[in-house]
Structures are given as structure tokens and as C-alpha cells.
Image (spheres, rainbow, N blue to C red):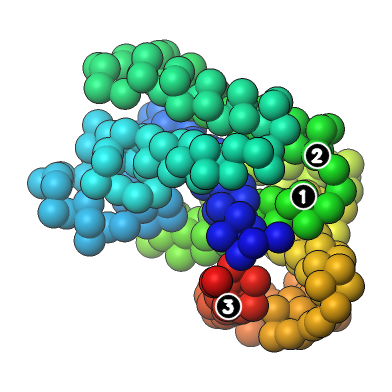
Amino acid sequence: MLSRTADNLFWLSRYVERADFVARILDAAHRFASLPTSYGGGGSNEWESALASAGDPDAFKTHYSAVNADTVCDFLAFSPHNPSSIRSCIEAARENARSVRTALTTEMWDAINGAWLELRNYAGKDLNRDEFGRFLDWVKTVSLTFDGSAFRTMLRNDAFWFTRLGTAIERADNTARILDVKYQILLPHDETVGGSLDYFQWTTILREVSAFNAYHWVYRESVKPLLVADLLMLNKQMPRSFANCYGVIVEYLDLIADAYGRRGPSQRLAGNMLAKLEGEDINRVFASGLHEFVEAFIAENNRVGEAIAKQYLVG
């Protein structure tokens, strides 16, 4: 496969996954903001949290004077000045898909091209709370449709492998950012860890990553920060966990290496990360610092992505 084709497939999947992530972050922020002020919501920093998790605060400041629901939703959902906005992600995904149209199945192309056309019904309009909620649900459906069409219709060859690599790299990064922002930013300094607001926030995050039922199936007890982190970081059964994503990354990098007849830095870095995650214990992670562990993971995940690009995607 030409490196340019592999690059387009890799980033097509990353942009679709990123749009889904931003939609989930905005949905969570709305849920936090709907809490009564007496409970800890309404006056907390849920919009700063959403911006820190899914956007670029410096770029935001050049276009908006205040951080609130309207400005953050506009920046993260529709702003052309934000390369990670939902609008920008869908447009970039469609451009990448158009460049490799013959490498996609009809169903995959219809999913992303249809999303790009449908986006016009939302962008530039003054949406009320209910309409904006339906927009976020639509974005999640786009991601599910595209992802499902890839699984159900693509040949299991290098085109499929690069598509899955892009999804897994992006998903690992997104999960890490959700965890880090929750632990470092979202809970107000005067609120008790393990208190009612803390419990609500962790529960909302589980729901937003479609893991609430999975949590109870695995742990069979009330929501606890340590166990939520264990599910989203170290449990290989959880599709969005670090460990699951790296299981996928290692699997497809190995298939690519076998097909192309050579191995390189990306296989080594990904294999080392998977081995580290498989040998890690969540109690040890919390004892040494969740923020530090997640921050190091994000940096190493970026290095894996860069290694994939240098090894396969740069022609």
C-alpha cells in the first residue's frame, strides 16, 4: 500500500473517533451543568473541564472572551478555528475519505459522506438545548455507523489494519484525557473526594464512555474512583481501556510487520507499552500518582503514533 493511502486511512479513523469523543465530552459537561448549585453544579468548572479535555484553551481565548456553555459548545462543536471541533473533524474525515475513495467500501463512504452533508443542517444554526443534544447523539451515531461498516464490510488486509490503528491510537488518547481532566480539574478544591459530587461525576463519565453497565458487571459494587480507573486503564475487556487499545495496536502492527517483512520502532514501543499495562496494578498507580501515570501514557501514546507515521505513513 502507498504510504499516502495508509496515512489517509489512519487519519480518517482518528478524526471520526475524535468527533465522537468531543460529542461525549460536551454531553457530560451539559449533565454536570444541569446539577443544582447547592449540589455542586451550575457554578463549578465543567466548561473549563470540557475545554481542557477536548480543545485548545489558548486558541479558544483568541476567539472568545468568556468560558461558558455557549462559547465552549460553539468552539468544540462548530468552530472552523478549532481543528478538533466536531465540524472540523467530520470535514477532515470526509476529505481523507475522498482521497482514498477506492480503498473504502461503499458503506464506509456513505457513512462519512452522508455525515458531511447532514452537518449542514446543524452548523451555523442557533440550536436550543434539546436540539444540541440531538446533534450530539447524531455525532455518536455517525461514529458507530462508520466503525460498524468498517468491521462488517472491509477485507482484513492492510487497509483495514491502518484503519483500526488510527481508531485505537485516538481512542487511547481520548480515554486518558477524560481520566486526567476528571482527576485534576473537574472536582472543585473544596469538594470531598468520594462525596456526592465526586460520585456523580465518575458515574457520568462511565455513562459517557458507554461503560456504566460494564463497570457493574465487572466489579459488582458501587462506583469508586480506583475501580473506574482500573476499568478504563488496565481492563483488557473494556473497549476504550488503555490495555484494550494497546492489544489492538500491537495486533495490527504485528500483522503489518509480517505483511511488509520488517519490524521497527512502532512495534517495539507498542509492545513495551502493552507489557507495562499488563504488569501494572491500579493500587500502585494511585499510590504513585494517577495524574503522573496518565500524563506519561499520553506522551508515550503520542510517541507510538509518531513512530507509526515515520515507519509507514511518510512517503
Q: Earlier in the sequence, mark 3 or mark 2?
A: 2
Q: The residue tagged with tag 2: helix, strand or loop?
A: loop
Q: What residue appears at the point 55 percent right and 40 percent down from the top-left corner?
A: 97
Give residue 133's position: percent from left, percent from top: 46, 21
Q: Earlier in the sequence, mark 2 or mark 1?
A: 2
Q: Amino acid at mark 3?
A: Lys
Q: CA distance from mark 3 to mark 2?
A: 25 Å
Q: The residue tagged with tag 1: helix, strand or loop?
A: helix
**In the displayed structure, would residue 315 be above or below residue 14?**
below
Answer yes or no: do the residues labelled 2 and 1 have beta carbons within 8 Å?
A: yes
Callout 2: few (<14), some (14-19), or many (20+) C-alpha neighbours within 10 Å? some
Q: What residue appears at the point 23 percent right and 37 percent down from the top-left corner?
A: 71
**In the displayed structure, would residue 55 be above or below residue 74?**
below
Whether residue 88 appears in this view of the structure is yes
For disc 2, the marked residue is 154
For disc 1, the marked residue is 160
